[in-house]
Image (cartoon, rainbow, N blue to C red):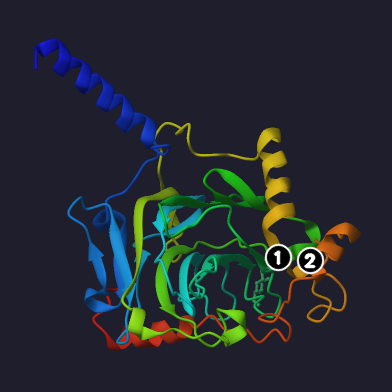
Amino acid sequence: MGYSQLGFLLVCCSVLVFASGSSRSLPVLPFDEGFSQLFGDDNLMVLRDGKSVHISLDERTGSGFVSQDLYLHGFFSASIKLPADYTAGVVVAFYMSNGDIFEKNHDELDFEFLGNIRGKDWRFQTNVYGNGSTSKGREERYGLWFDPSEDYHQYSILWTENQIIFYVDNVPIREIKRTETMGGDFPSKPMSLYVTIWDGSDWATNGGRYRVNYKYSPYVAEFSDLVLHGCAVDPIEQSSKCDNAPSHETIPTGITSMQRTKMESFRKKHMTYSYCYDRIRYKAPLPECVIDPKEADRLRVFDPVTFGGGRRRHGKQHHRSRSSRGKATSI
Ligand SMILES: *[C@@H]1O[C@H](CO)[C@@H](O)[C@H](O)[C@H]1NC(C)=O
């Protein structure tokens, strides 16, 4: 092969590399610089590139990690590839919380992926708690427009003083605006980012009908492109250190009108549950809900079996206690 051909090959391939990484200019953190293992011993594995990490669930334990810092507002993101095949009962969570510091009045923002039986798709839900408002779950549940076990997809949370936006592959899927009536239910204290995989047999799939089957374990969830972009704060000393890198063009600041159209279309097609329409759980919708009778009709066909009595449990206390017995690093 002559030099010119070689040159062509190099150009062609570097272009490919560029084009394939939609998150190429996101400020991606090496695992060791931003995170610590939370629990799960060697069920957490950092890959050789230092930036990708696999967490797994087997009959011994799940696993997880947590950001070393707490953040007040910011953009938090990961590319995730979920386990394939039979995954009923398996929960993969990508969430922010300060439950370890504010036990009675914690804040939380969740992505939770719920496995399924073979041939049925993963589903996911988002949730928001502010200042300990756990009796007022604000869950929404959805399907995806792709198979999340086939490839990496980007899941992100933008949290500012006045709004929270959940994204899937840069498509906003949920927006929460701070309203007067929400009061303290809008998260407003520094939170850490958590990533966990655990056994949610009791509720995750059809309200607990299908449980984790360890014959198919280990269940491995793959993470890369970990982004923690915000102000790291020390809630005790009240000091903060911000990521002052020049504004990254790939970090969103709000929803454009084109994105809003996409968000509405996603919600029409893929949302299967919203707390705003759950009249068993809330006789009167929570104050921020805007009720659309057509949406109510559409959602009525889905069975809110997991939510009905407000009996759902996260199991987070559960890993916390498990982790304290293991060799979990400090958080
Ligand atoms: C959060 O809860 C605490 C204790 O319950 C209360 O004192 C405080 O005013 C609440 N904060 C907001 C913003 O509502």
Say whether residue 19 is visible: yes
Q: Which residue is drawn at 28% across and 56% down?
A: 31
Cα separation, mark 1 vs mark 2, equals 6 Å
Closer-to-camera residue (328/246):
328
| Placement of the N terminus among the 4 image quadrants | top left
The residue that mark 1 highlights is 272
Amino acid type at circle 1 is: Thr
Helix, strand or loop status at disc 2: helix
x then y, percent, for residue 252: 55, 39
x then y, percent, for residue 261: 72, 40
Closer-to-camera residue (133/10):
10
> Looking at the image, do the residues carrying marks 1 and 2 touch, with CB atoms under 8 Å apart?
yes
Picture quarter containing residue 121? Answer: bottom right
Toward the right, the furthest residue is 293
Is 331 situated left or right of 287 in this image?
left
Q: Earlier in the sequence, mark 1 or mark 2?
A: 1
The residue that mark 2 highlights is 299
Q: Residues within 10 Å of mark 2 (few under 14, many from 20)?
A: some
Q: Quadrant of ligand 1?
A: bottom right
Q: Is residue 140 above or below residue 51?
A: below
Picture quarter containing residue 290? Answer: bottom right
Closer-to-camera residue (14/320):
14
